[in-house]
Image (tube, rainbow, N blue to C red):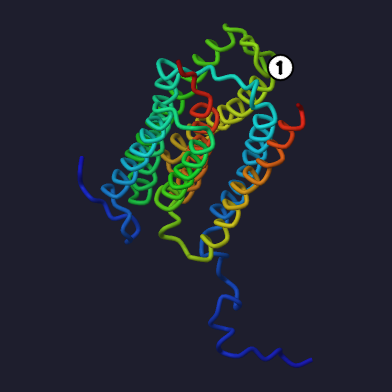
Amino acid sequence: MSEPKVDAATLNSAWAGGGSPFAIGSKKLGMWLFILSDSLTFAVLLFAYSYVRLANNDTWSHPFPIFPAVVFSTAMTVVLLGSSLTMVMAVAAAHRGERKAAAKWIIATMIGGAAFIGLHMYEWMHLIDEGLRPFQNPWGGSPLFGATFFGITGLHMTHVAIGVIYLGVMATGFGRGKFTSEDVEVSGLYWHFVDLVWMFVFPLIYLMSVKYN
Amino acid sequence: MSHANESQGHGATTKLFIWVWCWLAVITFVEVYLAYIHLPATLMLTLLIGLSVIKAALIMAYFMHLRFERLSLVLWLIPALVFCISLMIIFFPDGYRAWMMRG
């Protein structure tokens, strides 16, 4: 059996091996794969919401007046956006090797995430007090309003909570030298994904259900 | 703290991140303003999805670093994003039909 002949062009190309797909590390690639699959999960939920909302367009509730409800959820959006900015600062600091600074920026991101959850739970309690449940509508409209509202915002809030825990592990671990800057960057990808989902959830669920008059 | 820090030798400076963030905030307030002025539902929905896609593109390009990655990675991810949006939109006619058929 003779050696397979490989020409110089192949040996110098990506097919020669030793490289990583898309030239990113495997952890980053893994996180992007997870983000792809999670995007589909949220896309499917938003599809279900769109479908049942259109199918019940005449009985859909509009419980969010500009003040205070939309102002409140806009504040939540700005808080989450701010936490994305602090996360970007954290990754930049991590790449520069500044462990303490990066840990501080990650903690700032965690505070933003926790504040988002706190504000969101406050809003949830207000709606639950009014009688909204996953299959019950106190304002006489479609019960599916509660199902889609709690389902989508609940799954998103769960992602934020998991993110805060993940970032907590990162802040302590990276500060002590257990993790690399790539690990911080990967956790940043997750956090930005959570923010990205909210960029769609906020307009579609809140801004499309504003109470006028 | 307005120093511009080079990150890994490309144009990802602190100034750039804050600039992108300001645009995200501006677009958010534009969306809220559109809600305030009470547009017809279909126009509102179209504008909101359009603006949200722009925000998603900004976050993915700058915060998630895709602007500075290999093009092949971007080309791999963009169809997935298109698919997610389309998955939501493609069933609008069916939802409308379900509403009309209820009578």
Q: Where is B64 relative to A126, above or below?
A: below
Position of A65 with respect to A161 (left or right) is left
Residue A96 rendering spot, x and y as whole percentages: 33, 51
* Neighbourhood count class around disc 1 (C-alpha, 10 Å): few under 14, some 14–19, many 20 upward: few
Q: Where is A24 relative to A8, above or below?
A: above
Position of B16 with respect to A127 (left or right) is left
Front residue of this view, candidates A76 and B92: B92
Residue at image mark 1? A135
- Name the subunit of mark 1: A
Q: Quadrant of residue A140?
A: top right
**Residue located farthest toward the left when viewing the structure as drawn:** B2
Position of B20 with respect to B77 (left or right) is left
Q: Quadrant of the N terminus of chain B?
A: top left
Q: Secondary structure at mark 1?
A: loop
Q: Where is A1 relative to A209, above or below?
A: below
Residue A187 rendering spot, x and y as whole percentages: 50, 42
Front residue of this view, candidates A143 and A185: A143
Front residue of this view, candidates A58 and A164: A58
Residue displayed at 32% across by 45% down: A98
Residue A60 rendering spot, x and y as whole percentages: 62, 22
**Residue located farthest toward the right when viewing the structure as drawn:** A1
Amino acid at the residue labelled 1 = Phe
Residue displayed at 57% across by 71% down: A18
Residue displayed at 40% across by 40% down: A87
Q: Quadrant of the C terminus of chain B?
A: top right
Residue displayed at 71% across by 31% down: B99
